[in-house]
Every structure is written in C-alpha cells, then in structure tokens.
Image (spheres, grey):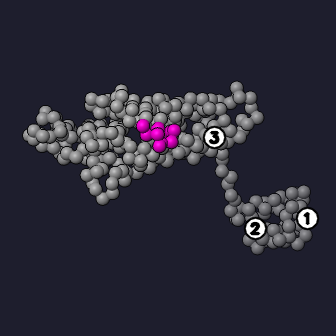
Amino acid sequence: MSHKAVSWALEQRHLKPGPWVVLIQLADRHNKDTLQCDPDQNLIAADCNMSRATVNRHLEDLETCGLIRRVPRVNPRTNKALSTFYILGLNFDNPPVVEYAVSQNETRKGVGKKGNKSEGRVSKCDTEPCLKNDDSRVSKNAISESQIETQTLVTEPVKEPCAADASHHRDLNLVLDEIWAAYPRKGDQLATEKAASALIEEGASPADLLAAVKAYAKKSASYDESRVKLSQNFFAGDFWRRHVPVAAKVASRDEILQARAETILEGKTFLCRSITAHAAGECITAGLVTPQDCLQAGIAL
C-alpha cells in the first residue's frame, strides 16, 4: 500500500463514484518502492464489490481521463496473458519498466497526446536498452525479452497479440452484464460470470446464454423464490440448454402447398373446410391435385 498513491486517488473528486472507487483500490494495491501495481481483475472486482465487466468499463474511463495507463502483458515462454500492469498518473513522469509488456512497452493506443509516440510509451528509455550503458534504467544483469526468446526452444509458433482481442473482451463483458441484469434470482455475481464465460470459451453462443436466461426469467416469474435456481447454478450442467428458445421454422411455399394437397387428397371434409377455392386452385396449378380431388373433398371451386 502506498499512502501517497491513496492520497492522490482521494483527491480526484471530480470522478463519478464508480471510477473513483476503482482508482482508490488500485492505489491501495500500489507499491510505493517498486511502483508495481498489477492486481488481478477478479481481485479488483472483489475489492470494489463490482462485476468484472463494470470494473473494466471504469478502468477504460480512468484511462481516457488520463489518470492511469493499462499495460497488457504476456508470458514470452508460454504466450499466456499475464495480469495487466497499471501505471498511476502520479508516476507518469517517472514510470516503471514493465516486464513482458505487449507492443514494445507501449500503453494502449489512443491514450496520451496524439501525434507524439513518446507520450504513449511506458518508459522513455529505449525498448532494447544497452546493458553496457551505466545510465540505463535496466539492470546490467537483466536479460532482454528478445534474448529470452532466442534462448528458449520454441516448440510452437508464437502468437502475436491481436488488437481484436480487446474488442472481444469488451463484447463478452457486455453480454455478461446483460445476463446478470436479466437473471431472476441473483446469487454470486463473480461465480455466475465465471460459469458463463467458461461455457462461451467451450463454444456456447453468448446469444443462446442470454436467450436462455430471459426465457427462464419469464417462465419462473410465477415461482416462489426458493424454486428459482441461483444464478451461478443455472449454468451448471445442461440445465440452461433446456431454456434456449427453439426458433420457429418458416415453411417454404412449396412445403405449404404440399401439406395442403395432402389434406385435400385425404378427403377429410372437416379439415378441408378451411381451404379456400383460391388456395385449392394454387395446388391444382402446381399439379399436386386435380379439380375432381377438390370437389370430392367438399371444396367448391
């Protein structure tokens, strides 16, 4: 915890309550000596008593306001995403060097002054610092990321970070928010979002999940609350799949004519009473029945 960082965050009273709480919690996780601030998003959500989706929106607001910089990171050996590194505004003039940062230690695009690439950098030092330089911010004994990659045997192609991943996560967060808002009996929000996210990762359609929740909410409206499953349990097993609405199949014109002709040929007058002369004429034109068939079924042409 950094008292200086917390005091700085508390001074940002121009913020709305949500982003302000998130900023204060980030400051509380800030190390005053190393300037390290990389709490897991689930931890931030728990600290703020918010969903991950809500926390993510507030983080975007804070970054847009120029109060923080988010630095995505990835493990160079496993290519697995690491927790995001947060640089607070009070450290912008002397930012820490972020290990394994994506995009050559740059923050997300659009943050900082436009047209000045150096402002978007996490550090003003070169991304490949010379280890022989006494003034380098990087330890002389440090190994650069490029050296790590050349020293590590790569068994699979390294996947470059994709800019579309960010929009994917934003879309997923919106779906999770909608699911939470629509569910009739809310339980543990983090557990609910985790269960829904796991299903989506396995290939389930986000639209189906949301549709199932809305259908269940409508069906259970008359239930006693105790009969309604808690939100985190709704996605357990295949229970949620039973509530995915089945889209009504729209019959083609040929299928309609074929079904109508079969009714006429069966000769059941009580069924043929609903068939008009015009509808029967369409079947005759299509060659499916004859005028005699229609007359025998009691249809007046």
**What residue sits 78% from the left and 62% below the top?**
260
Boundaries of the magenta span: 11-20
Q: For residue 212, which quarter of the picture? A: top right
Type of residue at label 3?
Answer: Ala
Name the secondary structure under disc 1. Answer: loop
Out of 95 and 54, give the one closest to the viewer: 95
- Disc ID at residue 288: 2
The one nearer the camera, 166 or 219, is: 166
- Classed neighbour count for the residue bearing mark 3: other residues with Cα under 10 Å, few (<14), some (14–19), many (≥20): some
- The earlier-in-sequence mark between 3 and 2 is 3
Q: Position of residue 165 (x, y in %)?
A: 40, 47
Q: Quadrant of residue 284?
A: bottom right
SS label for mark 2 = loop
The answer to whether the residue labelled 1 contacts the one labelled 3, judged by CB atoms less than 8 Å apart, is no
- Mark 1 or 3, nearer chain start: 3
**Residue under numbered circle 3:** 182
Q: Residue at x 69, y 59 (%)?
A: 251
